[in-house]
Image (spheres, rainbow, N blue to C red):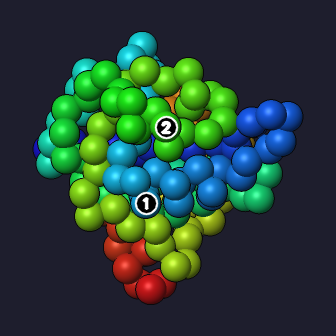
Amino acid sequence: MANWLFIVKDHVHGGIRIPAGDILRNRVEHRFWSLNSRARNVKRLQPGDNVIFYVSSSEGRLFAGHAKIASSAHPITPAQKFNIVGKPSENFDYSIELEDAEIWQKPLLAEELVGQLSFIKNKQRWPSAFRGSIRELNDEDYNMIITLAKMRS
């Protein structure tokens, strides 16, 4: 079982900015995550893997929730495609289903955890560690984020 960070950023639709938090709520509500089939790690996603949602937005950078992966990556269905709004997700061609998806009532500010997360190598330029859309997390980083989130709720 692997641990993943799914990164969602602000989207644009019809010239209007859609906050990343709104995109996350939509994905959790519909229980799937849209993916680019060419994104690194897509083929490694497996049912039962753990996910933490990371929001990078003009409204802040937050660890915002968690889920389990319920399916392997597959071509996006027409019904799933219907529920996607905004670029870049409108261009994504794959998806995975989610189970036990939850958005935390009290998200964790990423900058408060930078010093403790081993996957962030350059602590001065820590936002660059969140480029892309899927990032693997080791057990220690995953468990620390989950534990802190539970303590805050």
- The image shows residue 83 at horizontal and vertical percentages of 50, 43
- 149 relative to 1 in the view: left or right: right
User: Is 91 situated left or right of 48 in this image?
Assistant: right
Judging by the rendered image, the residue that carries numbered circle 2 is: 82
Q: How packed is label 2: few (under 14 Cα within 10 Å), some, or many (20 or more)?
A: few
Check disc 1 and report the residue beneath it.
Answer: 29
Element on which disc 1 rests: helix
Relative depth, front residue between 64 and 144 = 64
The label on residue 87 is none
Q: Nearer the viewer, residue 29 or 112?
A: 29
Give the mark toward the camera: 2 or 1: 2
Residue at 56% x, 21% y: name it.
Answer: 91
Q: Count neighbours of disc 1 (C-alpha within 10 A) and say few if under 14, some if 14 to 19, many if 20 or more.
A: few
User: x%, y% of residue 9?
Assistant: 64, 42
Q: Which element type, helix, strand or loop, lies under badge 2? A: helix
Residue flagged by tag 2: what amino acid is it? Phe
71 with respect to 153 (left or right): left
Whether residues under marks 2 and 1 lie with C-beta atoms below 8 angstroms apart, the answer is no
Residue 89 found in image quarter: top right
First of labels 2, 1 by sequence position: 1
Examine the rendered structure and indicate whether residue 25 appears above or below residue 10: below
Residue at x 47%, y 84% (from the top left corner): 152
Residue drawn at (65%, 50%) of the image? 20
In the foreground, 19 or 134? 19
- Work out whether 105 lies above or below 144: below
Q: Please indicate whether residue 67 sits to the left or right of residue 58 in the image.
A: left
Three-letter amino acid code at the position of disc 1:
Glu
Q: Is residue 128 visible?
A: no
Residue 118 percent coordinates (x, y): 43, 46
